[in-house]
Image (spheres, rainbow, N blue to C red):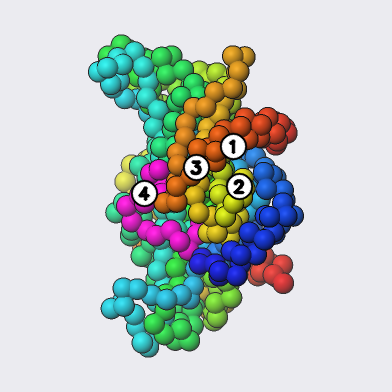
Amino acid sequence: MEIADITKQRIKQYLAKGMRFDGRKPMQYRDIVIETHVSKKAEGSARVKLGDTEVWAGVKLGMGVPYSDSPDSGNLMVTAEFSPMASEKFERGPPSIESVELARIIDRGIREGEVIDLSKLSVKSGEASWTVFVDIYPINDAGNLIDASAIAALVALRTAVFPELKDNKIQFGEFTTKKLPLSDNLPFTMTFYKIGDHFVLDPTVEEEEASDSMLTIAVSSSKKGEFVNAMQKGREMPMTIEDVNFIIDNAVKEYKKLESAFEKALK
Amino acid sequence: MAYTKRFDGRKADEMREVEAKLGVVPRADGSAMFRFGDTVAIAAVYGPRHLHPQFLQNPQQGIIRCHYDMLSFSVTERKKPGPARRSQEISDVTAKSLEPVLMLSQFPNTVIDVFINIVQADAGTRCAGINAASLALAHAGIPMTDLVGAISVGSLGGSVVVDLTKEEEDYEEDGEKAATDIPMAFTLRDGKVTLLQLDGKVSPENLKKAIEVGRKACEKLYDLQKETLKGLK
């Protein structure tokens, strides 16, 4: 969707007064709706809605050979497929750069946020270990797919259980009750969009189109305090150092709000 | 031994619990979810819209393209993301099953894209996809002469049963008694066949019976599709 210049101007005029078309404040997320166990065939699955944006994520486990530099670790594999179902902008064919980038940002948030203890996924040193596949599918793009996908991936991991294993072979379709080795860390991926002189979180499609630059930042919180686990600067327009500092400060501040919205949605 | 009692206790001509919902993909021009038991399909329609590359355009009428795929975690063993030969074939037969009811001559040079995602699979996915697509096309306001309904009928253990589950599809017995899956689609008012596939071994008598049973089962799908669309404003 190409939006008209007049809409872009109007978005900026609104933001100058701290307002958005849908009545939200600039840093306010839309309501989060979480549904778990959406596919009985998956080891873990979730459906997450941020307003009209909807993303499905599923966890499948596979048996693989560990990398030679980490013979006692399992693997994490995050992929995203931007089905043309979700938006007229997405096309069929090989994975688009946007879907690869999204998967890699979310991979980093999960990996560096130490959500999953890969060292506990070894089955036989150097020979066999679990591979955790997290597959992400946007179903409806109404803006901010990155943040919605990160939440969906996190919830899918939290609901995941191991499948049965016999002689190091997975018994597909038979599940144990054993959960994946996850920590309590909750990394949230927040993407800040800069529109003119203003920042917004959780943009709609129109706001995304009106934005000049964006910065994705994954923050996790534990007893040791908050940490930034992943970042990605997007779009062509540069950002000032002040912009970046503003985002870092606000990411930590908004993290708490997102965390309580997340906990509420899980109930 | 004949397969007289079904694994889930259904009668031979009884389909699983069905459910349909419109508007599941708000961004699309039309969309619907359709469920047979544990098989869930989502379909989204975009179009009629500009078709490129240009050489594909037909000045006489619009074209329909279907894109069927399964989510990687919709099946027990992870399906590698991306289309494969199986999904390409199903996409093609799905398009052919829907095309007869679409008034495509009203939209020359354009394309109607139908995207079908199977989010949970327990056999009968192409049929669930066609039912979802029929609803999504109507939801998108595409002029149609009829609706399309699809059901899988199976012959197993010498009996004819409708709407097989995966467990039934995997039923094994010697020779003609092993499970044979016959997915079929009908125009729901006219009762014309728009999809018919078969993979297995079945006697001509049972095949004829299967088609009859399938046609009958589609009456329920017609009612469901009509009821679902009545909710449209």
Q: Is residue B194 magenta?
A: no
Q: CA distance from mark 1 to mark 2?
A: 9 Å
Q: Chain of mark 1?
A: A
Residue that appears at 41% across and 14% down: A119
The three-letter code of the residue at mark 4 reads Ile
Please tell me the numbered disc located at residue A199: 2
Q: Nearer the viewer, residue B77 or A242?
A: A242
The secondary element bearing badge 1 is classed as helix
Residues indicated by labels 3 and 4 sit on the same polypeptide chain: yes
The residue beneath circle 1 is: A246
The secondary element bearing badge 3 is classed as loop
Q: CA distance from mark 3 to mark 2?
A: 13 Å
The three-letter code of the residue at mark 1 reads Phe
Q: Earlier in the sequence, mark 1 or mark 2?
A: 2
- Which one is closest to the eye, mark 2 or mark 4? 2
Q: Position of residue B141 (x, y in %)?
A: 59, 75
Q: Nearer the viewer, residue A266 or A219?
A: A219
Q: Chain of mark 4?
A: A
Residue that appears at 36% across and 65% down: B92
The secondary element bearing badge 2 is classed as strand
* Magenta stretch in the rendered image: A86-101
Q: Position of residue A255 (x, y in %)?
A: 64, 31
Residue that appears at 53% across and 20% down: A182
